[in-house]
Image: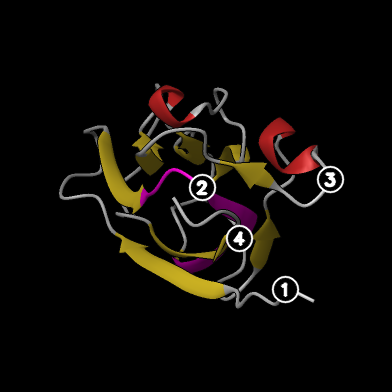
Amino acid sequence: MAQFQIRRKQVACTPTAVAGAQTWSIAIKKGERLHFGSMQRAVAAAGSTTSTFDVRVSAAAGGQAAGVLAATDTEGAVGSIVDGVGADLANAGGFLATADGTIDVTYTPGATPGATVPSARFTFGVSRAFPY
């Protein structure tokens, strides 16, 4: 019986400016399976903001827009956790990368980004599905 190990890939995301969009990328290789993705707020945005974080696997690897975590408000309790429930993770066993690509976390300030620079930590569970 084959066994596999789920590895954690993590990235901490703090935009360099509250009003500027920014993307962070983590490599995902052909044959790797993304089992889960989650966000934990480290610094919450000021109230009444429109800034968001979203997560997708790059189209090069076969991912869909916001396929891991749809646009999620940067407001909320510090330490609160948001699970990824996007279309890419709805498949049995998670998302299988069909080519090399990236897991992209994107910060979007929106029309009212507020005065506080938000920060969040993202954790992804990845295993090797095929030995390419």
Residue 38 is tagged as: 4
As helix, strand or loop, the secondary structure at mark 4 comes to strand
Amino acid of disc 2 = Gly
Q: CA distance from mark 3 to mark 2?
A: 15 Å
Snapshot quadrant of residue 19? top left
Residue sitting nearer the eye, 24 or 4:
4
Q: Nearer the viewer, mark 3 or mark 2?
A: 2
Residue in the image at 29% along x and 54% along y: 117
Q: Nearer the viewer, mark 1 or mark 2?
A: 1
The first of marks 1 and 2 along the sequence is 1
Amino acid of disc 4 = Ser
Q: Which residue is mark 1?
A: 2
Q: Nearer the viewer, mark 4 or mark 1?
A: 1
Residue 24 location in percent, x, y? 28, 47
Q: Main secondary structure of the magenta part?
A: strand
Q: Decide: marks 3, 2 in contact (CB < 8 A)?
A: no
Q: Which residues are magenta?
A: 28-42
Please indicate whether residue 70 sits to the left or right of residue 18 in the image. right
Q: Which residue is mark 3?
A: 92
Please indicate whether residue 5 sits to the left or right of residue 101 in the image. right
Crowd class of label 1 (few under 14; some 14 to 19; many from 20; radius 10 Å): few
Residue 7 location in percent, x, y? 52, 75
Crowd class of label 3 (few under 14; some 14 to 19; many from 20; radius 10 Å): few
Q: CA distance from mark 1 to mark 3?
A: 18 Å
Crowd class of label 4 (few under 14; some 14 to 19; many from 20; radius 10 Å): some
Amino acid of disc 3 = Ala
Residue in the image at 72% along x and 43% along y: 89
| Depicted 92 relative to depicted 99: above or below | below
Q: Which residue is mark 2?
A: 31
The first of marks 4 and 2 along the sequence is 2
